[in-house]
Amino acid sequence: SAVISQKPSRDICQRGTSLTIQCQVDSQVTMMFWYRQQPGQSLTLIATANQGSEATYESGFVIDKFPISRPNLTFSTLTVSNMSPEDSSIYLCSVDDRGTADTQYFGPGTRLTVL
Amino acid sequence: EDKVVQSPLSLVVHEGDTVTLNCSYEVTNFRSLLWYKQEKKAPTFLFMLTSSGIEKKSGRLSSILDKKELFSILNITATQTGDSAIYLCAANTGNQFYFGTGTSLTVIP
């Protein structure tokens, strides 16, 4: 399986600021995904990051709040903009397994706390 | 509406016990069922199930899928404290993975 790293692993931010989370994969992957996991909740898909095209956002998530970049097949960023305490969450990137869409593997996650 | 439901929500057992975790799903264009173990932050992959009745096994963990009744179970035998985690199941439609809310397992020494 692909090896995935995320930066930062955790951060504490002030309300109204923005944070960019980076996701790096050790191999080229077609699909990268960004999830949010709020305290006590399951994983919620924010968007699918496609290389060379706009990200596809799920209902309830918009590009202005969560802009995503996917400059190449091994890297993606998610920005959480104009943060509020409700954005406190774990943010996870994941990749599909060799483009088969059969299995997703997750990065180590970013724990974000907004004060 | 596509959904995945896990039960129980939480479970506390003693070391050596056997536990069964349940996952039922209702999704369109079901492709596979996956189990993950989540400790701290990131889920780690355990099993992928695509066919009914075929048990997947890894050490003390095993899982089976029933595509007729739309559910899967994850069994853990001879539990250890290191098994304490949240166990997530997800139904894959090929377009998206639908995650359940997880079962929080605590194994007491």
Image (spheres, rainbow, N blue to C red):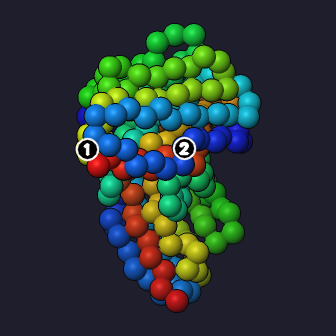
Q: Nearer the viewer, residue A43 or B41?
A: B41
Amino acid at circle 1 = Glu
Q: Position of residue B70 (x, y in %)?
A: 39, 48
Residue A26, picture quadrant? top right
Q: Residues under labels 1 and 2: Cα distance?
A: 19 Å
Residue B88, picture quadrant? bottom left
The answer to whether any part of residue B73 appears in the image is no
Residue lying furthest right in this view? A27
* Chain holding disc 1: A
Q: Nearer the viewer, residue B105 or B33?
A: B105
Query: For numbered disc 2, what is the local secondary structure?
Result: loop
Residue that badge 2 annotates = A8
Q: Is residue A97 above or below residue B81?
A: above
Q: Residue at x 55, y 80 (%)?
A: B81
State the quadrant of the N terminus of chain A. Answer: top right
B109 left or right of B105 in image: right
First along the sequence among labels 1 and 2? 2
Q: Which mark is residue A86?
A: 1
Q: Which mark is residue B14?
A: none
Q: Position of residue A19 (x, y in %)?
A: 43, 34
* Chain holding disc 2: A
